[in-house]
Amino acid sequence: MSTFRKYLLSATAFEMLAIVGTVINVTPRALAGPDTFTTIDVPGATSTFSAFGINPRGEIVGRYDFPAAGVGHGFLLSGGSFTTIDVPGATSTVAFGINPRGEIVGRYDFPAAGVGHGFVLSGGSFTTIDFPGASFTTAQGINPRGDIVGRYISAGVNHGFLLSK
C-alpha cells in the first residue's frame, strides 16, 4: 500500500474534508484562469457606494451618491447602461437585489430620520414592504419565485425575515 493511501486510511474526518476541499476548490479555479475585476462607477456620481446584487443575465443593482455624499440613489446597470432607481418622495433609495425576472428589492427612507421601508420594484411599480410592527424594514434579496428576504428592527432588535409568495 502506498504512503498516500495509508495516510488517507488513517486521516481524521476533518483532515479528509481538508483534502477533498483542496482538490475540489483549488483545482478547478486554477484551470479557469485569472480573475477579472471591472470597476462600476455611475457617470457623474460623487461616489458609487456599492454594487449589491447581480442576476444570471448580468444585471447589477446598487447605490450611488449624487450630488452629495449621503444622498443615495439606487441604480440598475443593464446592457452597459445605468438607470436610476428612486422611490417617489424618498430622500434616499438603495437597491440590494435583483432576480432573473428583473424584479428589484431594496430600501428607501423618508425625511423622518431612522425610518426605513423595504420595497420591491416590479413591472415599473414600487410596492412598499414593512414588516408588521417594525420601525425599520429593508428587503435585501429576491429569488426567481419572488420570495424576499431581508431585515427588520423591532424594539431596537434586528431580525431577519422571509416574505413568501
Image (spheres, rainbow, N blue to C red):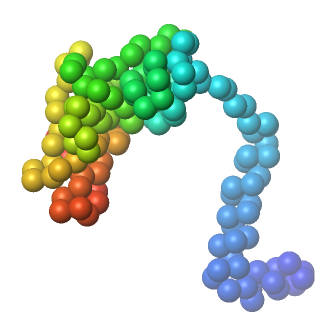
User: Which image quadrant: the N terminus?
Assistant: bottom right
Residue 73 showing in the rendered view: yes
Q: Nearer the viewer, residue 11 or 113?
A: 113
Q: Is residue 83 positioned above or below 63 on the image?
A: above
Q: Is residue 76 positioned above or below 130 on the image?
A: above
Q: Nearer the viewer, residue 13 or 162?
A: 162
User: Which image quadrant: the C terminus?
Assistant: top left
Side of 58 relative to 100 (left or right): right
Q: Nearer the viewer, residue 133 or 20?
A: 133
Q: Where residue 33 sits in the image (x, y, percent)? A: 79, 37
Which residue is depicted at the point 86% across and 78% down?
A: 4
Q: Where residue 44 sits in the image (x, y, percent)? A: 54, 12
Q: Is residue 26 positioned above or below 34 on the image?
A: below
Answer with the quarter of the image where residue 32 lies. top right
Q: Where residue 122 sits in the image (x, y, percent)? A: 24, 23
Q: Nearer the viewer, residue 44 or 6?
A: 44
Side of 160 relative to 48 (left or right): left
Residue 78 showing in the rendered view: no
Which residue is depicted at the point 23% across and 62% down?
A: 156
Figure disc tally: 0
Q: Where residue 103 sits in the image (x, y, percent)? A: 30, 26
Which residue is depicted at the point 81% across and 84% down?
A: 7
Which residue is depicted at the point 20% across and 37% down?
A: 112
Side of 106 relative to 15 (left or right): left
Answer with the quarter of the image where residue 61 lies. top left
Q: Residue placed farthest to the bottom in the image?
A: 10
Q: Residue placed farthest to the left in the image?
A: 133
